[in-house]
Amino acid sequence: MVDRRKALKVVAGVAGVAAAGTVLLPAAALVTATANAPRLPGRPEGGDDGWRTVARWEQLEVGAPLQAHVIGAEVDAWNVSPDRRLGTVWLLRGGESPETLRALSAVCPHLGCLIERRDTGFVCPCHESDFDAVGAALRGPSPRGMDPIEARVRDDRVEVRWARFRLGGTARVREEG
C-alpha cells in the first residue's frame, strides 16, 4: 500500500511538471521570439528615428506641391500591421537646393479631414478652411495653419518624420504614439 502511494505521488508530480511546462515553455518562447524578432519594414528601430521615404527629389517641381503618402508599420497594443498608410503630406519645393524643401501634414487641424490642393493654396473640403500656398490659415474654422512635418533629402530621397497633432486647438501639440 505504501509503495502504491509513493508511485501515485511520483506520477502526480510528473503530471504537475508536465502541465506547468505546457504553459511556461510557450511563454518563454514568445518572450525570446519577441526580443529577437527581425525589424519590420517601415518600423522605426534603433537609429532609424522614424524617417520614411515618401518621394524622389526629382519628382518635386519648384512651386508645385506634391501629395505623398507616409507608409510604415502601424502598431497597437497587440498587433503590428506592416506597410500601412500612416498619413499624408504635402511636399513643397521652394528652389533648386534641398534646403528649400518643406512638408505639411495633409490632416486639417480643425477636425482631421484630408486637405486638398487648389490653384492658390490648399482647402479642407469638409468645412471650407482655406490655407495659402505655404499652409497658413486664411479663413474658415481651422484654428491654425497646416502642421509642419520634419523633412529632409538624403541620397535623392525625400524623407519625412511623420507626426500627428492634436486637433481643434490653436496650440500645435504633437501626439505621442
Image (tube, helix red, strand yellow):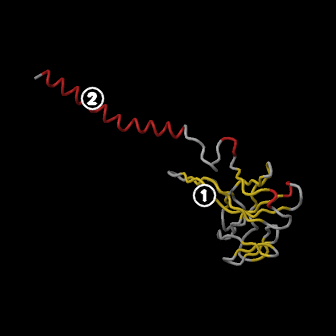
Q: Residue furthest left?
A: 1
Q: 9 above or below 135?
A: above
What's the residue type where badge 2 is placed?
Answer: Val
Residue at (27, 29) in percent of width and height: 14
Q: Earlier in the sequence, mark 1 or mark 2?
A: 2
Kindly identify which numbered label has been placed on residue 14. Answer: 2
Callout 2 environment at 10 Å: few (<14), some (14 to 19), or many (20+)?
few
Q: Secondary structure at mark 1?
A: strand
Residue at (72, 72) in percent of width and height: 116
Residue at (84, 61) in percent of width and height: 93
Q: Position of residue 160 (x, y in %)?
A: 73, 54
* Residues tagged 1 and 2 counted as in contact (Cβ below 8 A): no
Residue at (14, 24) in percent of width and height: 4
**What residue is pinned by disc 1?**
84
Instruction: Name the quadrant containing residue 39.
Output: top right
Q: Position of residue 72 (x, y in %)?
A: 63, 54
Query: Which of the two residues, 28 or 71, is positioned nearer the viewer here?
Result: 71
Callout 1 environment at 10 Å: few (<14), some (14 to 19), or many (20+)?
some
